[in-house]
Image: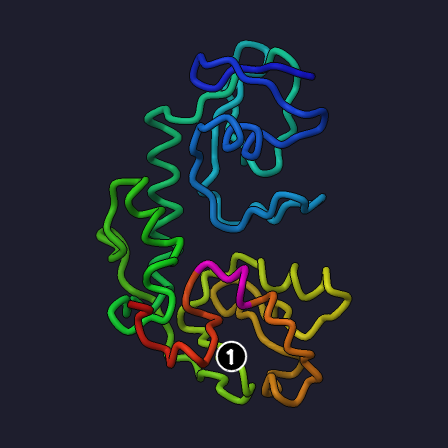
Amino acid sequence: MPSFTIDGQEITAEPGEKILWAALRSGIYIPHLCATEHDELPFGGCRLCLVEVEVSGRREMTTACSEPVRDKMKVYAHTEKVERMRRMAFELIMSDHQIDCKNCAKRKTCHLIKLASSLKMTLQPKTLRSLARDLPIDDSHPLFTHDPRKCVKCGKCVLMCQGMGKSFLDFAHRGFEMVVTTFDHLPLASVGCESCLECVKVCPTGALYLKETGGKADG
């Protein structure tokens, strides 16, 4: 088994294991949002798991969710540069997120709150103006609601839907206009969704929530 160091702490990894999962398994927390452990081609879009890796005497920035462990490699997960880049990434994410924690169905399980605490930040961006859009809510499905205003474009629901052999949810458009939606923006109730609810389970925010919660805080 390959061994490597994170901030001087030596840990072991499974062959081919990514830095992020080896770190978490060893009790070293690295912020992450879009990462899915068994994804062969990690999305890496949130940029919250950035770390520095020493290569030929120089430190290079990379995402821990996509970088496989190499024997004797040196990883730096909490340098000033890394922390600064993570905070910038988090502010970008939150600038396009409708903040309504009081009425959010996933308030107690929201991953954004955990990330803000880890990064010692507030949910409200301080250096960027809010770019949150007033997108229409899809309430057509009998079991769950899709609120794109709270979507952070992590891609977990898309990956899960595809992993189930379906493609009811996917990304549409590019850049700032990107959204998770159905083909041709059709209502979820009309695209043949089989109600497995796996997308709701993996959603880290209140973008997908069960109707039984009523869209209110769960507690």
Rendering coords of residue 33 (x, y %)? 48, 49
Residue depicted at 51% across the width and 28% down the height: 23
Q: Out of 181 and 213, give the one closest to the viewer.
A: 213
Residue depicted at 65% across the width and 59% down the height: 159
What kind of element bears circle 1?
A: strand
- State the predominant SS element of the stretch in magenta: helix
| Residue 156 in magenta stretch | no
The image quadrant where one finds the C terminus is: bottom left
Residue tagged by mark 1?
144
The crowd level at tag 1 (other Cα within 10 Å; few <14, some 14-19, many 20+) is: many
**Residue type at tag 1:** Phe
Q: Quadrant of residue 97?
A: bottom left
| Residue 203 in magenta stretch | yes
Q: Quadrant of residue 121?
A: top left
Q: Is residue 169 above or below residue 85?
A: below
Residue depicted at 46% across the width and 58% down the height: 204
Residue depicted at 65% across the width and 61% down the height: 160
Q: Quadrant of residue 31?
A: top left
Rendering coords of residue 106 (x, y %)? 38, 65
The image quadrant where one finds the N terminus is: top right
Question: In this picture, which residue range is highlighted in magenta?
Answer: 200-204
